[in-house]
Amino acid sequence: MKKIPFLIAFLFVSLIYGQQNTVSDYETKIFMKPIEVAASAILGFQFTEAKTVKYVITQRNNDVLTKEINKNAGTQILKADFSFLENGLYEIRFIIDGTEVKTIPFTKI
């Protein structure tokens, strides 16, 4: 009888752990280079599954550009044109499955 509460607690913890979202894994697998952008930058996605990735460029909490990318299976790197941006500080926010997974600040020079 003493094993039943332990078993229930173990199953509860296992269920909670199994339901956790793996969004935080994307944070380490998305990058942008360089951080000081003159005209264009490289966006890299180092995760294997195919996903629709939306990115939003903001300046002072105002959305400047929103774009969706259909990422193929495997690692993907693409060039993004930021030449239309005025000089200043910006953030690029990456959204996957409706959840913001990473924010990268950058400077347009």
Image (spheres, rainbow, N blue to C red):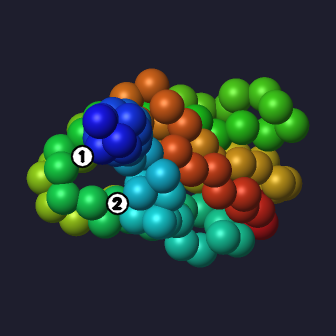
In this view, which residue lies farthest toward the front? 1
- Relative to 76, 22 lies left or right: right
Residue 1 - label: none
Front-most of 29 and 39? 29
The answer to whether residue 66 is visible is: yes
Marks 2 and 1, how far apart at CA? 8 Å
What residue is shown at x 29% (from left), y 36% (from top)? Answer: 1
Q: Amino acid at mark 2?
A: Phe
Instruction: Determine whether label 2 and label 1 are within 8 Å by CB.
Output: yes
Label 2, secondary structure: give it: strand
In the rendered image, the vertical position of residue 38 relative to residue 99, given as above or below? below
99 to 75, vertically: above or below? above
| SS type, badge 1 | strand
Amino acid residing under circle 1: Lys
Q: Nearer the viewer, residue 107 or 49?
A: 49
Q: Around disc 2, counting alpha carbons within 10 Å, would you say few (fewer than 14), some (14 to 19), or many (20 or more)?
A: many
The residue drawn where x is 22% and y is 65% is: 75
Q: Quadrant of residue 107?
A: bottom right
Please provide percent x and percent y for residue 16: 39, 36
Quadrant of the image for the C terminus? Answer: bottom right
Residue 36 placement (x, y as % from top left): 70, 71
Residue 6 placement (x, y as % from top left)? 37, 43
Q: For residue 45, which numbered disc appears in the image?
A: 2
Report which residue position mark 1 lands on: 71
Q: Residue at x 59, y 62 (%)?
A: 39
Instruction: Determine the image quadrant of residue 4.
Output: top left
